[in-house]
Amino acid sequence: MHERSLLGSIALAAALLTTIAGAQAFDDAKYPNLKGQWRSIGGPMRFDGSKPWGPGQEAPLNAEYQAIFETNLADQAAGGQGYDRDFVCQSPGMPRITNGYGQMEIVVTPDTTHVLIQHIHDNRRIFTDGRDWPEELNPTFLGYSIGKWIDTDGDGRYDVLEVETRGPFKGPRAFDGSGLPLHADNGTVVKERIYVDKADPNVAHDEVTVIDSALTRPWTVMKNYRRSPDPRPRWTEENCSENNHIEIGKEDYMLSFDGLLMPTRKDQPGPDLRHFNASRK
């Protein structure tokens, strides 16, 4: 019995040493400091925060998708939602998540870098464990992301995270709230270079390149984020399910404060009630 107890103690000690060694293997000093709360610089409602909304983005859309975009703008001007599906709580998906439309947190672990978005909880998982692409991928709004940390200046510390995100994606998806469309084939590829500004450690950059069949060429945009100076920032909960939009058929309606259906634009037809009995007078 004493020998068995001794062997058990040795096994437990070995397991603890292995765990400690594994924990020590991850040296966070080798990685850039990305802790804290980040918010977009230049406006989270635009894919390119340095350019105006909508047509001012000068997105390199092909003729087919430029026409779709213009139809979308006309629908929005008339009170509709156009190509943007955010109003029904659909995930904005990639690459729109890089717009930083909510409070953002970046968590670096040995095998995965997590980008946590407080708005609608669109949380990304970027695998950095050296894995290859799976043979089959299920369609998702966020896609599948594989990254690699790089030491670009040879100082022994990583300073750039290179990421590639592939589909198949779910759709439809838009670049931003103006309804700039991505292709319906959902075959988007997104490449990123994420790093902290060398002159200001409280500024981070994400160079995003989108390759998509709706575009005439790859579209590269620099996203910029600023870290909150508060060491204990406030994190607010945003539940998209609390919105007051309802989609019936191809029409978008709103709920009034008293729970009644309301139109969203002038002369909007009411919903089809064929499956309901006629109201009694």
Image (cartoon, helix red, strand yellow):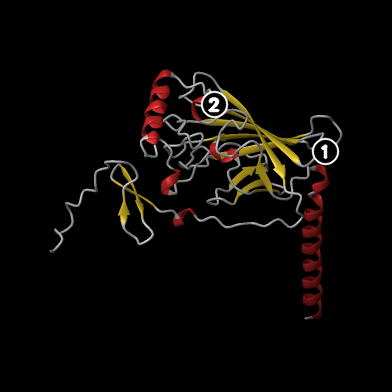
On the image, the x and y values in percent for residue 221 come to: 61, 28
Q: Amino acid at mark 1?
A: Arg
CA gap between label 2 and label 1 equals 36 Å
Q: Amino acid at mark 2?
A: Gln
Is 132 on the left or on the right of 37, as rendered?
left
Mark 2 or 1, nearer chain start: 2
**Residue nearest the observer in this picture, 136 or 182:** 182
Secondary structure under tag 2 reads helix
Residue at the far front in the pictured view: 266
* Residue occupying image coordinates x 60% and y 57%: 236
Q: Is any part of residue 43 visible from this angle?
A: yes
* Residue occupying image coordinates x 78% and y 49%: 26
Is 148 on the left or on the right of 156, as rendered?
left
The residue mark sitting in front, 2 or 1, is: 2
Q: Residues within 10 Å of mark 2 (few under 14, many from 20)?
A: some
* Residue occupying image coordinates x 63% and y 29%: 50
Quickly name the residue at label 1.
Answer: 157
Image quarter where the C terminus lies is bottom left
